[in-house]
Amino acid sequence: MRKNQGNTANNTVSIIGLIQVGLVLLKVTGKSKLSWVMTFIPLYIELAIVLIVFLVFFIKSYKLNDQIRKYKIKKNEMLD
């Protein structure tokens, strides 16, 4: 028996992705009366989550960079 080692693919789909596929299928088959904008709401939710994570990361890194810069200035003043 051969063991699966090395390169393995992750074939998981998120719940929001499944909801998205279901809504699109319902819209295409004519079973849903939602507009296309409303059909893609799960996509907007995922986009909002990604943007929030990016903003939190950006703000934290900016604050950390500012603290490091202040520390270096203070250290240089002490050496002078």
Image (cartoon, helix red, strand yellow):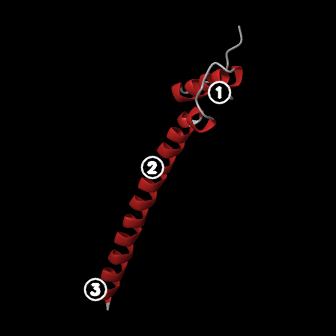
Residue 56 in the image: above or below residue 70: above
What's the residue type where badge 1 is placed? Val
Corner quadrant of residue 63: bottom left
- Residue 24: image tag: 1
What's the residue type where badge 2 is placed? Ile
For the C terminus, the image quarter is bottom left
Mark 3 lies on a secondary structure that is helix
Among numbered discs 2 and 1, the one appearing first in the sequence: 1
Among numbered discs 1 and 3, the one appearing first in the sequence: 1
Residue 33 horizontal/vertical position (percent): 60, 26
What's the residue type where badge 3 is placed? Met
Q: Which residue is mark 3?
A: 78
Is the residue marked by circle 1 packed among few (<14), some (14-19), or many (20+) residues within 10 Å?
some
Q: Nearer the viewer, mark 2 or mark 1?
A: 1
Query: How far is mark 1 from mark 3, CA to CA?
Result: 64 Å
Between 41 and 78, the one lying in front of the other is 41
Residue 36 horizontal/vertical position (percent): 63, 35
- Give the residue displayed 59% in from the left and 28% down from the top: 20
Query: In the rendered image, is residue 55 in sight?
Result: yes
Q: Nearer the viewer, mark 2 or mark 3?
A: 2
Q: Is residue 44 left or right of residue 30?
A: left
Q: Is residue 5 left or right of residue 47?
A: right
Mark 1 lies on a secondary structure that is helix
Query: How far is mark 2 from mark 3, CA to CA?
Result: 39 Å
Between 5 and 69, the one lying in front of the other is 69
Q: Which residue is mark 2?
A: 52
The single residue placed furthest to the top in the displayed view is: 1
For the N terminus, the image quarter is top right
Corner quadrant of residue 42: top right
- Give the residue displayed 67% in from the left and 22% down from the top: 25
Residue 76 in the image: above or below residue 14: below
Between 76 and 30, the one lying in front of the other is 30
